[in-house]
Amino acid sequence: MRSLLTIALICSAPFAWAEDATDADDPKVVSCQAQASIVTQAASLRSEGKRERKVKRLVTEEMDEAMKPAVPLLVGWVYTLPKGDLDKDPGPAYYEACLTQ
């Protein structure tokens, strides 16, 4: 799974995660956007040198209840990425991979 997401990250990095007006009501789109937001925030905090445990706490504090269970998994995944991939903003790539699931 990690290698699939890493490949998706590399292949889809140039794509922006644009939202279509009709997609705003699609639960999958909303969920993928929320997850991608967590990934982006975690990558940014990791780039700043924050430790994984602290990032999990910080991101969890800001999430609504429905997304809180996903935070440890997504932050943990971000910490498995090579540091060089953080510069490419893995959030949009994660969003694209999420939509294809």
Image (spheres, rainbow, N blue to C red):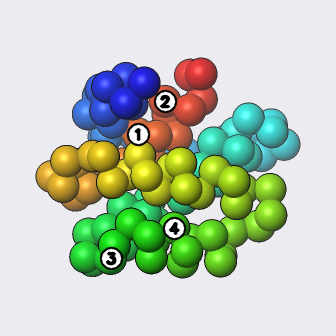
User: Where does label 2 land, which residue?
Assistant: 97
Closer to the N terminus: mark 3 or mark 2? 3
Q: Which residue is mark 4?
A: 56
Q: Of the residues shown, which amino acid type is indicated by label 3?
A: Lys
On screen, residue 91 versus residue 67, left or right, reads left
The alpha-carbon separation of the residues under discs 1 and 3 comes to 22 Å
Which residue corresponds to mark 3? 50
Give the structural element (helix, strand or loop) at label 4: helix
Per the image, the residue denoted by label 1 is 93
Q: Residue at x 70, y 60 (%)?
A: 68
Secondary structure found at label 2? helix
State the separation of the CA atoms marked 1 and 2. Answer: 6 Å
| Above/below status of 2 relative to 31 | above
Real-space CA distance between mark 4 and mark 1, rounded to the nearest whole angstrom: 20 Å
**Residue 44 seen by the camera:** no
Return the x and y of residue 99 as percentages of the image width and height.
Answer: 59, 29
Label 1: state its secondary structure: helix
Pointer 3 or 4: first along the chain: 3
Which of the marked residues, 4 or 1, is nearer the chain's N terminus?
A: 4
Task: Identify which amino acid the numbered label 1 is placed on.
Answer: Ala
Q: Residue at x 41, y 46 (%)?
A: 77
Relative image position of residue 83 (x, y in whole percent): 18, 55
